[in-house]
């Protein structure tokens, strides 16, 4: 009987079974950043331990770094301290650190793939839940907590239970104006925010196969918002073409040999799954959240639910109250104050290219504060070479330096008061974007652009005549 | 770092109601700017407990009768959101020793287990009954029996379930796996060589 990718990669990396019944699993790649690693290095020091595999460990700063100016020392003392601790620890342990202005700094889940560090068949971990992004390459990519970061630093392994695998087949062709972001929001809305608990998600089907690597990363990125532990796409020719020539990928005969190995990781045609869901691509519309969880989402031409009839009436009522939207209101037309394009979900070159294509000649509405934040120094450089930054700036966006920015506001990019933000990020929880009364509406990059121009949630297909 | 086996946890309880209570609510992102976890306790549920001026909003955790509560009760999908350990750390530093909920987000559950915070599942009707009991008597001792998978309070008994591997880890005192992982470094290195990483 054939195996699915999760089983193949799991079996390949298991070191042994622990007395507790959990498995000890080798981590092929460990990515670290400044929020979840300082305490782990402190724990190592307390126990007089060293890093077992420094050459399989790579660091960057993304969460706390400002996006307007990144000169050191940073204005925020604690942010400066966090970067310094990471800088000192990586130097001490011989870990490569993609520091600000090194040319390689950026959001950790943008940096790994663009450098070619993320490769098919790997187990990858990072102290950040959107590590699932790397699954787009055919990896088991897991978000972990700081104590587990400590475990991986010390032993390059994790104690884990295996996961069940649900295959989600998205079949058919996406309609015009429907993007990878809409696919992932649609999946979460359909299966629920805890639908995936205990599962790894295999994203498959013709619509997924037709996606570029950056689109696949967007889909895998939000696996966690659907409750899944991780999500992946089987590696294929699209994957190999993306990786060919990347900085950290071997070349020539070595590359060809790697490709044959990578091909073998894809789920076998007779692989079995614990569950399967089929979604028709034609059913997916541009999707936006209306509430305070990523699962509280509707199509752009729908209205907010009615707590009297909705399944989780109390949750719906609380969410509507917080968002200051009435029940049964069309989501199109909700006023916005801030527009944010960026994040590990949608901060890659193709995201900015897609928006620049439709933005030319248009202007951000006067009441809207709009920022575009490239996901990495490399994305920034490539975007500038194409003149994208000028297109955004001419339209009224601020073009910023790389970082997580307004996704989670651990840096100066925050909402003020009860501002509403049209955002290409991944979470709309209460307070997520830095204000305890701030309101987030998640959507795709072109939908953020449409909202920025109209000053309200809008249908990008209408605004840009797609 | 294997401690003592944890077979039961007891203390006063407080019920923080609501499904999908996420890690950003448990510990707002601005408190994640730190290099140790030591200061996180007072910031637990900060924006739910204090208004922008710092005035108390009368949250259940701040009610005088719930002072010193060490057992947290909540509803479904508790701890959804981030994998960052700051949320369980804030819960632990605040003084909570265990959580009873309808269900838990997976990464959060794993982080709590590593820290030695048992997360046990109690279904809705029993949870509501327990919540009513402690509303009537906030001082009542709530005892979670990890071995027997029961919760007792004021002579009433409630059923709980727990993820098998977590339960076994608490009973065997192996919930923090670092020492166990380090004992196999020879096998780890063999795996690394086989995979081409050494």
Image (cartoon, rainbow, N blue to C red):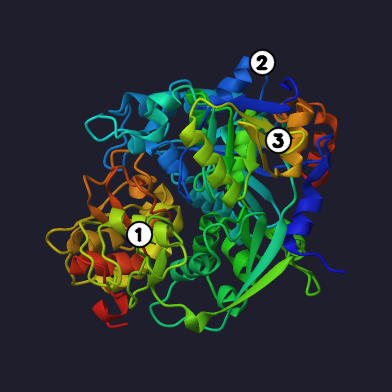
Discs 2, 3 touching: Cβ within 8 Å: no
Q: Which numbered mark, 1 or 3, is in the foreground of this view?
A: 1
Does residue B155 appear left or right of residue A274 in this picture?
left
Which labelled disc corresponds to residue A317?
A: 1
User: Residue A414: x and y, percent?
Assistant: 28, 44
Q: Quadrant of the C terminus of chain A?
A: bottom left
Residue shown at 38%/55% (left/top)? A292
Does the image show residue A454?
Answer: yes
Q: Earlier in the sequence, mark 2 or mark 3?
A: 2
Q: Distance from label 2 to label 1 (Cα)?
A: 52 Å
Dot 2: within a 10 Å radius of its alpha carbon, few (fewer than 14), some, or many (20 or more) residues? few
Marks counted in the figure total 3
Residue A400, how many percent across, how many down? 29, 49
Residue furthest left as drawn: A366
A161 to B28, vertically: above or below = below
Quadrant in which the N terminus of chain A is drawn: bottom right
Residue A48 badge: 2
Residue A461's place in the image compared with B188, above or below, is: below
The residue tagged with tag 2: helix, strand or loop? loop
Residue at image position (41%, 41%) is B25
Residue A37 visible at all:
no
Give the chain letter at badge 3: A
To which quarter of the image does residue A91 belong? top right
Q: Pointer 3: what residue?
A: A156
What residue is drawn where x is 26% and y is 42%? A68
For the residues labelled 2 and 1, say whether their Cβ atoms are less than 8 Å apart: no
Image x and y of residue A211, in percent: 53, 72
């Amino acid at each position: 009987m054939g195996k699915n990718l999760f089983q193949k990669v799991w079996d390949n990396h298991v070191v042994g079974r622990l007395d507790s019944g959990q498995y000890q699993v080798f981590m092929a790649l460990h990515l670290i950043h400044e929020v979840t690693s300082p305490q782990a290095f402190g724990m190592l020091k307390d126990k007089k331990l060293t890093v077992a595999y420094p050459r399989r460990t790579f660091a960057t700063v993304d969460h706390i770094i400002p996006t307007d100016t990144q000169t050191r020392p940073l204005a925020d003392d604690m942010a400066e301290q966090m970067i310094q601790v990471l800088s000192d620890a990586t130097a001490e342990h011989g870990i490569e650190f993609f520091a600000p202005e090194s040319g390689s700094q950026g959001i950790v889940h943008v940096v790994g793939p663009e450098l070619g560090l993320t490769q098919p068949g790997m187990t990858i971990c990072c102290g950040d839940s959107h590590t699932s992004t790397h699954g787009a390459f055919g990896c088991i990519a897991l978000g972990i907590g700081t104590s587990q970061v400590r475990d991986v630093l010390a032993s390059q392994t994790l104690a884990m239970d295996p996961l069940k695998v649900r295959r989600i087949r998205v079949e058919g062709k996406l309609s015009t104006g429907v993007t990878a972001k809409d696919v992932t929001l649609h999946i979460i809305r359909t299966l629920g925010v805890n639908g995936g608990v205990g599962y790894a998600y295999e994203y498959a089907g013709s619509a997924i196969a037709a996606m570029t690597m950056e689109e696949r990363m967007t889909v895998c990125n939000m696996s966690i918002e659907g409750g899944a532990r991780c999500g992946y796409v089987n590696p294929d020719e699209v994957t190999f073409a993306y990786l060919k020539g990347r900085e950290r990928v071997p070349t020539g005969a070595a590359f060809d040999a790697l490709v044959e190995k990578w091909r073998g990781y894809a789920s076998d045609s007779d692989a079995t799954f614990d569950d399967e869901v089929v979604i028709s691509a034609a059913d997916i519309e541009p999707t936006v959240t209306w509430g305070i969880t990523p699962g509280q989402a509707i199509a752009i031409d729908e209205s907010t639910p009615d707590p009297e009839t909705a399944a989780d009436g109390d949750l719906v009522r609380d969410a509507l109250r917080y968002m200051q939207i009435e029940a049964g209101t069309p989501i199109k037309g909700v006023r916005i104050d801030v527009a944010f394009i960026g994040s590990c979900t949608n901060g890659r070159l193709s995201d900015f290219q897609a928006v620049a294509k439709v933005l030319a000649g248009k202007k951000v509405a006067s009441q809207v504060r709009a920022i575009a934040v490239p996901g990495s120094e490399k994305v920034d450089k490539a975007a500038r070479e194409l003149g994208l930054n000028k297109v955004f700036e001419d339209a009224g966006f601020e073009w910023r330096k790389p970082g997580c920015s307004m996704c989670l506001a651990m840096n100066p990019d925050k909402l003020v008061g009860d501002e509403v933000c049209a955002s290409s990020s991944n979470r709309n929880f209460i307070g997520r974007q830095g204000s305890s009364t701030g309101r987030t509406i998640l959507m795709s990059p072109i939908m953020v652009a449409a909202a920025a121009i109209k000053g309200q949630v809008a249908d990008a297909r209408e605004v840009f005549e797609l | 770092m294997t401690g003592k086996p944890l077979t039961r946890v007891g203390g006063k309880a407080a019920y923080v109601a609501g499904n999908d209570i996420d890690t950003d609510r448990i510990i707002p992102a601005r408190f994640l700017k730190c290099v140790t976890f030591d200061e996180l306790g007072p910031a637990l549920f900060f924006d739910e407990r204090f208004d922008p001026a710092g005035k108390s909003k009368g949250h259940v955790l701040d009610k005088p009768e719930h002072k010193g509560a060490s057992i947290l009760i909540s509803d479904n999908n508790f701890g959804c959101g981030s994998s960052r350990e700051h949320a369980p750390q804030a819960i632990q530093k605040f003084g909570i020793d265990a959580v009873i909920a309808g269900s838990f987000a997976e990464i959060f559950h794993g982080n709590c287990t590593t820290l030695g915070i048992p997360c046990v599942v109690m279904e809705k009707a029993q949870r509501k009954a327990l919540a009513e009991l402690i509303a009537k008597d906030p001082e009542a001792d709530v005892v979670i029996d990890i071995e027997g998978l029961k919760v007792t309070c004021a002579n009433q008994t409630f059923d709980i379930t727990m993820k098998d591997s977590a339960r076994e880890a608490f009973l065997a005192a192996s919930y923090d796996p670092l020492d166990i992982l380090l004992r196999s470094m020879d096998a780890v290195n063999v795996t690394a060589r086989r995979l081409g990483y050494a």
